[in-house]
Every structure is written in C-alpha cells, then in structure tokens.
Amino acid sequence: MKKITKICCIGAGYVGGPTMSVIANKCPEIQVTVVDINKARIAQWNTDNLDNLPIYEPGLKEIVGESRGKNLFFSTDVDKAIDEAQMIFISVNTPTKTYGKGKGQAADLKFIELCARNIAKVAKDDKIVVEKSTLPVRTAQAIQNILDNTGNSVHFEILSNPEFLAEGTAIDDLLHADRVLIGGNDTPSGQAAKDALSAVYEHWLPKERILQTNVWSSELSKLVANAFLAQRVSSINTISALCEKTDANVQEISRAIGYDSRIGPKFLNASVGFGGSCFQKDILNLVYIARSYGLNEVADYWEQVIIANDYQKRRFAENIISTLYNTVSGKKIVLYGWAFKKDTNDTRESPAIAVADALLEERAEILVYDPKVSEDRIYADLDYLGTRTPQENRKLLKVTPDPIEATKEAHAIAIVTEWDAFKTYDWQAIYDHMLKPAFVFDGRRILDTQTMKKIGFNYYKIGE
C-alpha cells in the first residue's frame, strides 16, 4: 500500500471544507488541496479574517488558521489538484431533482458526473476516488463506469466514505467520530484502497471505529442512519400534536420513554420540524430506491416521516394564524432564527422558510433576525420557492440586525431556531414595547413557560 502524500477534494462546501481542514490538521505530512469552480467561495476560504469563512462551525476557524498555507490549500485550479493527487474526494452538491424522472425524490447527479468526467480527462496515473457527498446507492458504480471508459489506461479504485456530520458540531464529530465507514470493492486493489483511506483516519481515530464494508452497504448505511434519526423526530413531533390537545407535556413523555435503554434519549426533542441538507434528501432517496424496485410498502412507510415533518411545520404556522384571531394581514410578526438549527449558518430545508412562506401568504409583515444567516441567503431561500415575486418577498419581509428593536409594535414573536442567545434576552423589555396582547410561539421549546406567562405573554410552546 503506497503512502498517501497528496489529497485533493472537489467541492468546498459544508462537507469538503471542514473534513479536509481536520484531515490536514491531523496529517501534517499530507498536502490537502480543496478545489471549487466557485471563485467567490474559494476567496472566502482564503480570507485573512477567519470570521469571514463561508461556513460557520464552532472550532472551524481555529483549525483552518493553524493549517492553511502549511499543508491545507484552497484553490480554483481543479485540474492541477486532480493531476497531483493520489486520492481524490468528491464532495459536491447532490440536490434533489427538480425536473424529469424522479423529480422531487431522486438525487440530481449532474455535478457528480461532471466531476467524474473531469477526473477521467485529467488523470495520468492511478487514483483512489472517494465519494463523500450524500449520494444515492449505485453512484459508485456510475462513477466507475465513467472512469473506466476513458482510454487513458489509468486504474481507478472507487470508495464510498459517507459523512455523518451534524451541522453545528461538525468539527467535534470529525475529531471524535462514532464510526467511519469505508466501502469498496472486495478485490486486492479494492482492499488496498480501503486500507489507504483507513490509514488517513487512523492518524487520530482508533482502528476499531473504522468499519470497512462493500460499496452498497456503505452507501445505503448513510441513508438508513439519517432515515432512522429523522423518524424519531417525526415520531415525537406527531405526539406533540396529541399533547397539545390533551393535558400531557411532550417533554415529560420524551423523558419517560428516553429512560428506556432500548429507545434512549437522543433525537426526541419536539420542535417545529427537522431541516438540514440531509434528512429530507436521504429519506426521499430511500423512498425512490424502494419504489424503483417495486417495494411500494417500504417506500410508503419511509415517506410518512417526511409527511409528518411537513405537517409539523404547517401546524406551527396555522396555530399562529388561528391564535391571532384568524388574520395576520398587516400584522407585524418577528421570526427569531432562520438557520435550520443553532450554531450553523446553513438554511437548507429550514422550517423557518416554510413558516415564513405560510405567513406571507396571509399577508403578514415579517421581520427576521438570525445571528449568522445573511440577508441575501434569506431572500434567496424565499425566492427559490417561487410562491411570489422577489419584489413581493422584499416588500413583506425585512431582515433586521437588532432582535430587540425589531419587536417594537409587533403582534407576535415566533422562535424557529434554538439559538442560545434567545434564552438570555430581556423578555420583560420585549414585552413592554410589543402590542398587547403580546404573543410568543416557541417552536423550539427553549423558554420557561411560567416565566413568560408571569411577564404577561400569551405563550405557546409546541407539545404543551
């Protein structure tokens, strides 16, 4: 097995950036180059001010600061990096298809295929190609087919190395991974490639946490892990709806069932719904794969997890509307949070988008405050839905830098992201300058019910 000394990663996003930064940091003898055709994004990764990196993750800027310019490089010269590397990670976006066959469920592999064709074109010697993006099963096979038909007589080994990062704790998840999954061919050269990648991770992780499997198992494990986690969230969220109709408290139920060692306490926090780039996408992929093999009952079962999640987001918005006397037209509503969860600036599939969209349909006037998400991103998320014109979105929804000032003359506040800062606000001061009755809808269950009611708020918490 030859020593890996040069790694290249195509794609400088939420997976590629942090993963490669940690690899470079832990493997000082390996040169790691992250490439992307997006010049603006690479410029952000190379910025002098580490607070301006394109991704916000606790601990990321420190690691980038330590390694960048030594053995960690960010570049737009894709071909040069491919040519020099012995191991190439593919970490590009794989959005759900918005067109054609499999629309709304299958992953769009356009970017993956372009990557593979580019590698095939440039490569002059043998390479290990690692798929790191969240991909549907059988992608490795597709990449292999493209690479094997290049005519350069170069040998490629394809590995599947799915990421299990949770945004907001990605650096910690990389440094202290529960497990690393490496799928590859069960051939001598396939085994050598798996061992070469394993050796990279063994710089900082114990060998027993690095699991080697065949490609299919590795690819499918990623989808299944996310599906199981999302299923827990949707399960407790459906129970939160039942709690609101009875005298039960969802937190007490979560605690009671969480003590059961077979169930465990994690991923049982009721909320306005799950978001993020993976849960919905991976389940839809699982649904699509099951349907394509004629396994309709399997597909229906997993699709229900998404249906329950959409229901939870819709229920939250509808509760705001019905509580405000069935009309929010012209009423000022402040949304606290836009990111899909705290400690990240990622907004993909964020419940905030669905909630804002529903309120805007009712002609509410919305003010959004999020400590890490940019105004451009917020408008881009709304425009992408195509519910109304970009002009209308900008007229009805405004982004504010001041969360307290924003609540002046407001009818209601909806908490849609669980940023810790929201708990420390002076809620008495906020109450004083809101219109009365003053409503707070806590979609993340982060505030204390008694305290809020004592101040005078009409306070609604999911699951109570």
Image: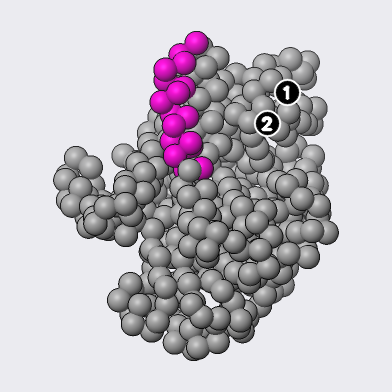
Q: Is residue 366 above or below residue 221?
A: below
Write down the residue under mark 1: 100
Determine the image quadrant of residue 80: top right
The span shown in magenta is 294-310
**Main secondary structure found in the magenta portion:** helix
**Residue 302 included in the magenta stretch of the image:** yes
Q: What type is the residue that disc 2 sits on? A: Lys
Residue at the extreme top: 294
Residue 267 visible within the image:
no
- Which one is nearer the viewer's eye here, 204 or 424? 424
**Residue 408 included in the magenta stretch of the image:** no
Is 193 left, or right, of 257 in this rendering? right
- The residue that appears at 71% across and 65% down in the rendered structure is 397
Mark 1 neighbour class, 10 Å CA radius: few under 14, some 14 to 19, many 20 or more: few
Write down the residue under mark 2: 97
**Residues at marks 1 and 2, CA–CA distance in whole angstroms:** 8 Å
- Which one is nearer the viewer's eye here, 312 or 145? 312
Q: Is residue 224 above or below residue 19?
A: above
Q: What type is the residue that disc 1 sits on? A: Gly
Determine the image quadrant of residue 227: top left
Q: Is residue 453 above or below residue 103?
A: below
- The residue that appears at 62% across and 57% down in the rendered structure is 359
